[in-house]
Amino acid sequence: MTWLLERVDGEPWDNQHAAREVRGGVWLYTCRSAGQLWPLGDCSERCAHPTPADAERHYQQYLLRSARYDGVWQGKEYRCAVCQAWTDRYAVLETHVVVSLCPAHLDRAGLERLALAQALAAGQN
Ligand SMILES: [Zn+2]
Ligand SMILES: [Zn+2]
């Protein structure tokens, strides 16, 4: 599941951020760069996620909590990602992903609905 992880500029995800098995049967959401590996977001050495999906969910919780909801497009509008209404508002995630949301969905609950919808669309859960 990769929602919220794609870069807004459309560049392909570089595969440095991913759920990885750090020891037998223990998954963390991690960044790997220059030969180093470290946990991202709320994931830490104390985590012991049994599956990659669990690690991704933990990271998703961090993204939801740290998102900012004060974005305003200047002079343009996009469809709300939840209800398709036109809106000039957006949320920004720590990953620099921008999500257009109408005022009714411009909060953590709106992003969570989006996550759920995408998870269902992907045939997960
Ligand atoms: Zn974790
Ligand atoms: Zn909406």
Image: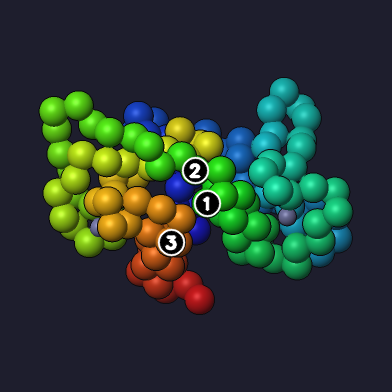
Q: Position of residue 107 (x, y in %)?
A: 41, 53
Residue under circle 2?
67
Q: Amino acid at mark 2?
A: Ala
Q: Position of residue 74 (x, y in %)?
A: 20, 26
Instruction: Tell me which numbered mark, 3 or 2, is placed earlier along the sequence.
Output: 2
- SS assignment at label 2: loop
- SS assignment at label 1: helix
Instruction: Tell me which numbered mark, 1 or 3, is placed earlier along the sequence.
Output: 1
Give the side of residue 17 with respect to residue 113, left or right.
right
The span from disc 1 to disc 2 (Cα, nearest Å) is 5 Å
Q: Nearer the viewer, residue 39 or 24?
A: 39
Residue for point 28% across, 57% down: 104
Give the side of residue 24 with respect to residue 37, left or right.
right
Other residues around mark 1 within 10 Å, as few (<14) / some (14–19) / many (≥20): many
Residue under circle 3?
109
Residue for point 46% across, 39% down: 68
Tell me if residue 124 comes above or below residue 71 in the rendering: below
Residue under circle 1?
64
Examine the image and state in which quarter residue 10 appears.
Answer: top left
Give the side of residue 30 with respect to residue 98, left or right.
right
* Mark 1 in CB contact with mark 2 (< 8 angstroms): yes
Give the quadrant of ligand 2: bottom left
Q: Is residue 98 visible?
A: no
The span from disc 3 to disc 2 (Cα, nearest Å) is 12 Å
Residue for point 76% across, 37% down: 38
Other residues around mark 3 within 10 Å, as few (<14) / some (14–19) / many (≥20): few
Tell me if residue 81 comes above or below residue 15 in the rendering: below
Q: Nearer the viewer, residue 8 or 111?
A: 111
Tell me if residue 106 comes above or below residue 54 in the rendering: above
